[in-house]
Image (cartoon, helix red, strand yellow):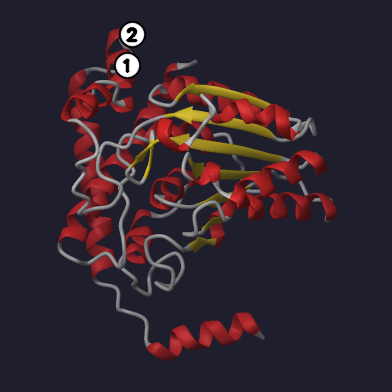
Amino acid sequence: MNPETLLALYTKMLQLRVFDQICVELKREDLILDGFHSYQGQEAVAVGVLSHLGSEDYVLSSHRPQGHALARGADPGRLFAEMMGRTGGVGGGRGGPMTFSDWEHHLVATSTVGSGVPIAGGVALALELRGRPGIAVSLFGDGAANTGACHEGVNLAGVWHLPVVFVCENNQYGEALPFARSTAAKRISDRAVGYGMEGLTIDGMDVIAVFEAAGRCVEQVRKGEGPVLLEVMTYRFRGHYEGDPDNYRTSEEIAAWRAKCPLEQLQERLMEEGIVQQARLMQLKEEITGLMQRARNWALAQPVPRMEDLYGAVLEVSS
């Protein structure tokens, strides 16, 4: 992998981390509407997978869509505004932190666990029926993998040989329930054989491993070789939601996973290979922090939608 790509992956992951930390602060001030689910620790998944997509592709997200949207190319200011329900948001402030749509970048977030999986299949089917290029990528958690909607969506995609990459972000917990206590299979990817598709499990804390595996999956799906089930083993550093007592994990477990931080791993490699010096990395963090703070300030200056704006949007869609 060339140095430019490595640095680009690190830069994008750092953007996600800084954005997310500012969201944590905004949520503590009660400025982010509804629940907020931090993406810290899982940055390698969004960046490693979505870096391979083009403008013709579609992304179906669920919990923690802010990480997916930013990795897809969403404007940070408009994304902050959406998280706070402001008119300048990617969805006009109507969706909030979990159910927004960024049509400019073909991303839709659904908050109902597992619901994005069959929708991704529907999008892929529509692309095929209309003879349009592009694929669909569905991102969902290990908890969602046990829902009926997920099973039905993945199965039908296998039956119809649809152009979908199903990405399970296995962060070890479905809310507070450990993966081992909720799932009989050792790996989610083991289920792929029952759906008639390839399945693989990779290290989600290594962005290079994710980038390379996702690249192969996307290429395979683009060639018309059918859908793929990609399980990415990762970990969320913070609680399921901001305010979560997080009393179902041990401090030792969290520390062990934090030692595998995807940003720190790549940062060490960048310096070891002489691609970038520590001074430049510190400067990069300052630049990204400044960018995100300006984006936050812009979003805070945006007004809240009027009731007639929200009601009008419903009428527009229903008509």
Which part of the image, by quadrant, shows the C terminus?
A: bottom right
Q: Is residue 33 left or right of residue 205?
A: left
Tag 2: amino acid: Glu
Q: Which residue is located at x 32 percent, y 13 percent?
A: 269
Dot 1 corresponds to which residue? 270
Tag 1: amino acid: Leu
Quarter of the image where one finds residue 194: top right
Dot 2 corresponds to which residue? 273
Q: Which residue is located at x 22 percent, y 67 percent?
A: 31
Q: Is residue 265 left or right of residue 148?
A: left
Q: Which residue is located at x 75 percent, y 46 percent?
A: 156
- Separation of disc 1 and disc 2 at Cα? 5 Å
Q: Position of residue 231 (x, y in %)?
A: 53, 30
Q: Which residue is located at x 45 percent, y 50 percent?
A: 69
Q: Is residue 263 left or right of residue 94?
A: left
Q: Position of residue 149 (x, y in %)?
A: 62, 52
Question: Dot 2: few (<14), some (14–19), or many (≥20) neighbours within 10 Å?
Answer: few
Q: Of residues 318 and 88, which is closer to you in this image?
A: 318
Q: Which numbered dot is residue 137? A: none
Question: Dot 1: few (<14), some (14–19), or many (≥20) neighbours within 10 Å?
Answer: some
**Residues under numbered marks 1 and 2 in contact, where contact means CB atoms less than 8 Å apart:** yes
Q: Secondary structure at mark 1?
A: helix
Q: Position of residue 318 (x, y in %)?
A: 63, 83
Q: Of residues 234 and 304, which is closer to you in this image?
A: 234
Q: Is residue 26 above or below residue 283?
A: below
Q: Is residue 105 above or below residue 310?
A: above
